[in-house]
Amino acid sequence: MPGSQQSRAGWCGSSLGKWVLAREDPILADLVRRFHGDTLVWSGGTPAAARGVKRCMVRNCFYLAVRETETHAELSSMTSRLSALPMPNRSADGFVLHHSLELEDDPREALREVSRVVAPGGRLLICAFNAMSLWGLRAMYGRLHDDPFSGMRFVNPLRLLDWLALLGFRPETRTAHLGFGLPLHLGWNWPGQVGAWLDRVQPPTGGVVIVSALKQAQGGRWVGRRQARERSRVAPVAYPKPTAWKPLERRR
């Protein structure tokens, strides 16, 4: 599709994209504040969305751009795809995938590469569009027509949690969901009580899913029942049992 590449980065500038970013900002700011360590990588979204990294306790923050024109004015920027990160193993204490997983041809391969970079004990924050929601219809529409969401592969949250578990990540907080209505910005919102109920119950049908996971520390340790080793018994030594000694008669 000719306009696919342009649409991939253009959803943030649409009216619906601005609404999504405004709803995501307070949740991401609270989750990113928990990051700590030496290195944090923010991938995807827009450079303006990565301003939340200033509130975390990380010494070095980098912005990973898909294109060279998407550089960050305040953070050190690098250009690369998630499936081929130019970083050594276990070199990042935190990684944020802000709608960048939907741009990969193979999301599983991208997550495997991110897992290679994240150190044990590091955090992974994923913000993606939910394929198991009404917003999945918008993705189907984008395959046939030129749309701001064209060229994006929405993520199945059930598969996402399975992939993270296989890679050694454990969800740190409850999965958050946003956008329970139609993927159209019509200026209409749910009634107050219904919207508050949806935000409180958090059904897995929201258009945006946010997952925060912690990578488990690697290292072998015995988790089964320890078997007691039988002690080898020493064979008893035979010795004469003392009996009543008879007085020896001296021969005269």
Image (tube, rainbow, N blue to C red):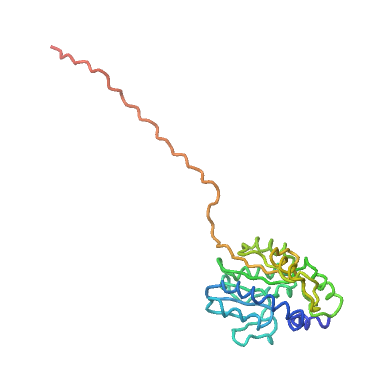
Depth check, front residue: 228 or 196: 196
Please give left or right for residue 7 compared with residue 22 in the image: right
Q: Quadrant of the N terminus?
A: bottom right
Q: Residue at x 27, y 19 (%)?
A: 243
Depth check, front residue: 188 or 109: 188
Residue 168 in the image: state x and y as whole percent: 61, 62
Please give left or right for residue 239 compared with residue 249 in the image: right
Residue farthest toward the top in the current orientation of the protein:
252
Residue 60 in the image: state x and y as whole percent: 54, 79
Residue 123 in the image: state x and y as whole percent: 59, 69
Residue farthest toward the right in the current orientation of the protein:
144
Residue 31 in the image: state x and y as whole percent: 60, 71
Please give left or right for residue 134 compared with residue 64 in the image: right
Q: Is residue 165 above or below residue 8?
A: above
Q: Residue at x 42, y 35 (%)?
A: 233
Q: Is residue 81 above or below residue 74?
A: above
Q: Residue at x 82, y 83 (%)?
A: 3
Q: Is residue 77 above or below residue 119?
A: below
In terms of image quadrants, where is residue 148?
bottom right
